Amino acid sequence: MDYDVVSVVSRRFSRPMLELSGDVGLGLFCTVVAVGGSLIATGSLRTAFGLPVVFFLPGYATVSALFPESVSRTERDVPPAARRAALGFGVSVALLPLVGLLLAVSGVGIVPSSVVGTLGGLAVVGFLIAGWRRRQLPSGERFHVPLHRHARRLHGWIFHQRRVRDRVLNAAFVVAVLLAVATLGYGLVVPAESASYSEYSLLTESESGELVAGGYPTDLVQGEPEQFVMAVENHERERVQYVVVAELQRIDPSTDAVTERAELQRLSQGVGDGETWRPRLSVDPPLTGENLRLAFFLYTDDAPEDPNSASAEEHLFLWVNSTAPGTVNSTAPEATDSTTGSTDGSAPETANSTTGATNSTTTEDANSTTGTANGTTGATNSSVSGSTNSTATGTANSTASQTESQNGSATAVRPPA
């Protein structure tokens, strides 16, 4: 009895679905699976499920609803099976802007889930209308894809062979084709897994507020904190707890060993896969000196008390100079004042000393010359008076002229009384 019920149900539902609308039934099944997969899956798998819903199924359902009859059974220009498939792509592409406009006007928004859901709904309605219209036509005029006939031929080609070896070879061939198609589809849909890693970078904020990898402050002053931004990108394919430690270190140049260190800040944050964490660190240097090393260490889960580059997952170094507050401002003015004082004090003294020496020398020479001229004039007048008046007079006049000349040069320095 049970066997008869199953046979009746199979004959009543299975055969009509395959005979009358094999492509319609397969289209409905593919639409439901593709829409459900695109809404549930993520990444490339979601794209693979959504592509047929966007670019083929709605158009093919529309064409099937418009042309339910077969090519050889009507005078209308009905597209054959190959043209129906081509029109499926074209009509689907034409429906995309209409669906986008409908979603935008309705306020739903153009998002992948709404687009795929709407197109999937149109495909389901189109296939149901196509199946109903085919049922209204005589069986000889309906367009159908005889899936059961092709399945029966394949079954006979595999299992209705006389020799067992031929059956095994045919079955192995079919299995190999199916495996090849499945492998190709898996390779196209599922991306190859890359190595897991964490990306770590040091950033600063520009004048426009943009984070850039450059322009780091290297001259630090105690009491004037400088801001740094760390960028930690998680590509570990799982959620990771990151710890960032910042230190200022004094390095021995001969051995490259750390002689003194001061921890500045320690931050921790859980970051999901594909997410980026950007902690901000305020650096106020507790050490002073030149060529200090500002170190940033990245750890996962937990960081030790004494972090170093060997134990850290990633590390970044920045060489800086650190000074005490007021050191730069107090040194420059003292040097300037000292230099100015030396210039103002020594130049007048030198000028005055030189001027005094010039005045003294010129006055003495002028007085000496004047005395000599007067003495000579007196001696000439006393020794040759009366007998050599012409000579004495010439000599006196000459000497007097010399005296006037000497007095004239002395007057340039000091005027006569």
Image (tube, helix red, strand yellow):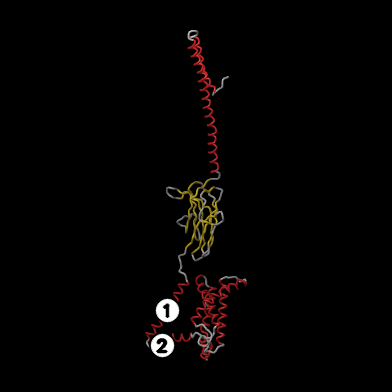
User: In the image, is residue 415 above or below residue 210?
Assistant: above
Q: How many residues crowd around disc 1 within 10 Å: few (fewer than 14), some, or many (20 or more)?
A: few
Name which of mark 2 and mark 1 comes first in the sequence.
Answer: 2
User: In the image, is residue 6 above or below residue 105?
Assistant: below
For the image, the number of numbered tags is 2
Q: Can you give x and y, in whole percent of width and height, for residue 42 in the image?
A: 52, 71
Kind of residue indicated by mark 1: Val
Looking at the image, which residue sits at the far top? 386
Q: Could you tell me which secondary element the residue under label 2 belongs to? A: loop
Q: Can you give x and y, in whole percent of width and height, for residue 213 in the image?
A: 51, 56
Find residue 68 and report its image quarter: bottom right
Residue where numbered disc 1 is placed = 177
What is the quadrant of the C terminus in the image? top right
Task: Point out which mark residue 384 bears.
Answer: none
Q: Can you give x and y, in whole percent of width and height, for residue 103 in the image?
A: 60, 72
Looking at the picture, tell me which residue is in the foreground, 208 or 395. 395
Q: Could you tell me which secondary element the residue under label 1 belongs to? A: helix
Q: How many residues crowd around disc 2 within 10 Å: few (fewer than 14), some, or many (20 or more)?
A: few
Task: Point out which mark residue 160 bears.
Answer: 2
User: In the image, is residue 144 above or below residue 247?
Assistant: below
Kind of residue indicated by mark 2: His
